[in-house]
Image (spheres, grey):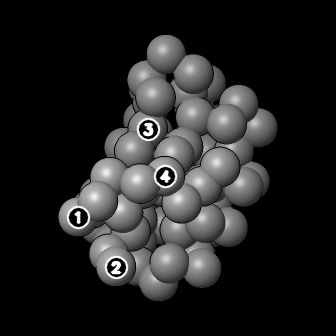
Amino acid sequence: MTLVPLIDPNACAAHGDCADIAPEIFRVDDLAVVIGTGPDELMIAAAEACPTSAIRIVDSETHEQAYP
């Protein structure tokens, strides 16, 4: 299983918590963007830290949602 983060641009308020936790995965300009990959646990921790719940984590093969 390979997890990937997806960002809802309508929900993202560019707080930057995701990039603080996982700078190798996220960058925040006007909105958060995915720039790389990292450990599943780190990706989920960054998604959990998002105050607007703009990040979903899905399985790249099955498209099943792993978080939230």
The amino acid type found where label 4 is placed reads Gln
Q: Which is nearer the N-term, disc 3 or disc 2?
A: 2
- In contact (CB < 8 Å): disc 1 and disc 3: no
Q: Which mark is residue 7?
A: 3
| Percent position of residue 50, x then y | 69, 45
Q: Which residue shows up at 60% across the image and 79% down it?
A: 41
Residue 60 vertical placement versus 65 (above, below): below
Q: Is residue 30 visible from the viewing direction of this image?
A: yes
Residue toward you, 53 or 68: 68
Nearer the N terminus, badge 1 or badge 3?
3
Q: Which amino acid does label 2 sit on?
A: Met
Nearer mark to the viewer, of 3 and 2 = 2
Disc on res. 65? 4
**For residue 52, which quarter of the picture?**
top right
* Separation (CA) of disc 4 from disc 1: 11 Å
Cα–Cα span, label 2 and label 4: 12 Å
Residue picked out by circle 2: 1
Identified at 67% across, 67% down, the residue is: 45
| Whether label 3 touches label 4, CB < 8 Å | no
Label 4, residues with CA under 10 Å away: few <14, some 14-19, many ≥20: some
Q: Which of marks 1 and 3 is in front?
A: 1
Around disc 2, counting alpha carbons within 10 Å, would you say few (fewer than 14), some (14 to 19), or many (20 or more)?
Answer: few
Residue position marked by numbered label 1 in the rendering: 61
- Looking at the image, is 30 positioned above or below residue 58? above
Instruction: Please state which amino acid type lies under the numbered disc 3.
Output: Ile
**Marks 3/2: CA–CA distance:** 19 Å
The residue at the point 34 percent across, 79 percent down is 1
- State the CA–CA distance, disc 1 to disc 2: 7 Å
